[in-house]
Amino acid sequence: MTSNPARKRAAGGSLTGLALGDALGFPTEFNDVPSILAKCGPWREMELPARAFVSDDTQMTLALGRGLRTAMDRGYLAPKRLERPLREEFVDWYQSPENNRAPGRTCLRACDLLKEEGRVWQDASQVDSKGCGANMRVAPIGLAPGLSDEQRSGAAQLQSALTHGHPTALAASDLTAHAVRLLATGTEPAALIGRLRSYALDNRTHYRHTWLGDLWTRSHDASPETFAARGWDECLAVLDRLQEAVRTASPETDPCLATGAGWIAEEALATGLLCFLLFPDEPVTALRRAACSSGDSDSIACLTGAFAGAWLGADAWPAAWAERIEYRGELLALGALWDA
């Protein structure tokens, strides 16, 4: 099946869902499930806070979205054309007084290095970090129209590499953007894991030299191909766990028990997908399941929302929720641009 992402407003739906998941999961991050239930009541009835504040997840998604828009406005999307505005946007976020939402250490460390003029970005990249901070923000690259497969993959990996240079962070970001794109263009949820596995296998030893330069030399790997394979293999392993969980996991059970707590990139991808795939046509229930989890609940829920919104479109979300999300104007403007 294919569908028209513009007609269902996939970009607006995905960005809104991402921010809603973030705002729902932000107050429950660092809590175990019994504590969340004690604070919020039954998980299927969780309510969006009256003041729907988001975390650094949405802030960095918007920074990426702005950088991507700037790069695409300047012409054909290529590595240097993307790297410059992205670097500026990430440093602006780092220095902003609004950067007070429990940002990740890797992003802070890398952005502090990126702000130094003359430093090549590969020397700022944290090649030992595969935290989820790179794939929780990558949805815009799956939503922007008109990119080739090579551009989308390269851009997804480059935006990760500016902060999180571990090969698993690169592969998980690439897979996350690819999943968003597949859902936006009508791939049925039941076929999604198989499509992602095939994509990972096709790319397993492919190192994107044009986009990543000599990043791999900062690692202990013997070659760029072994560097790339290390990341894709970890993602393939977690996709196997996801496939089993979709078949056997109870929706009433903490999803982190099946596919991981989401602090690291491949687990955030898998657990965000699990919550979506348990409830592919009940997007609010999917967000509530993601937010009522023992792991990195805001990042898991923001990924769940990005997937659900890409699949179902902008009308998936209750107006009473969407109208009070923080940064709503900018989220809608970016969505409208890419849905036009």
Image (cartoon, rainbow, N blue to C red):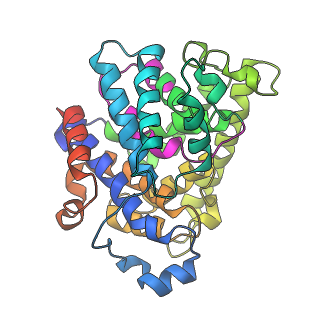
Residue 154 sits above or below residue 9 on the image: above
Residue 116 x %, y %: 56, 26
Q: Residue at x 28, y 57 (%)?
A: 326
Answer with the quarter of the image where residue 139 lies: top left
Q: Residue at x 56, y 71 (%)?
A: 254
Q: Which residue is more in the foreground, 311 or 17?
A: 17
151 left or right, relative to 328: right
Q: Which residues are magenta?
A: 128-153
Q: Residue at x 57, y 48 (%)?
A: 132
Q: Is residue 141 magenta?
A: yes
237 left or right, relative to 59: right
The quarter of the rendered structure image containing the N terminus is: top left
328 left or right, relative to 86: left
Residue 141 sits above or below residue 235 on the image: above
Q: Is residue 244 visible?
A: yes
Q: Is residue 95 magenta?
A: no
The quarter of the rendered structure image containing the C terminus is: top left
Residue 266 x %, y %: 61, 46
Residue 222 x %, y %: 83, 20
Q: Which residue is more in the foreground, 105 or 138?
A: 105
Q: Which residue is more in the foreground, 176 or 278?
A: 176
Total numbered labels placed on residues in the image? 0
Residue 88 sits above or below residue 63 on the image: above
Residue 116 sits above or below residue 246 on the image: above
Answer with the quarter of the image where residue 24 lies: bottom left
Q: Which residue is more in the foreground, 88 or 40?
A: 88
Residue 227 x %, y %: 73, 26
Q: Is residue 232 visible?
A: no
Q: Residue at x 40, y 32 (%)?
A: 141
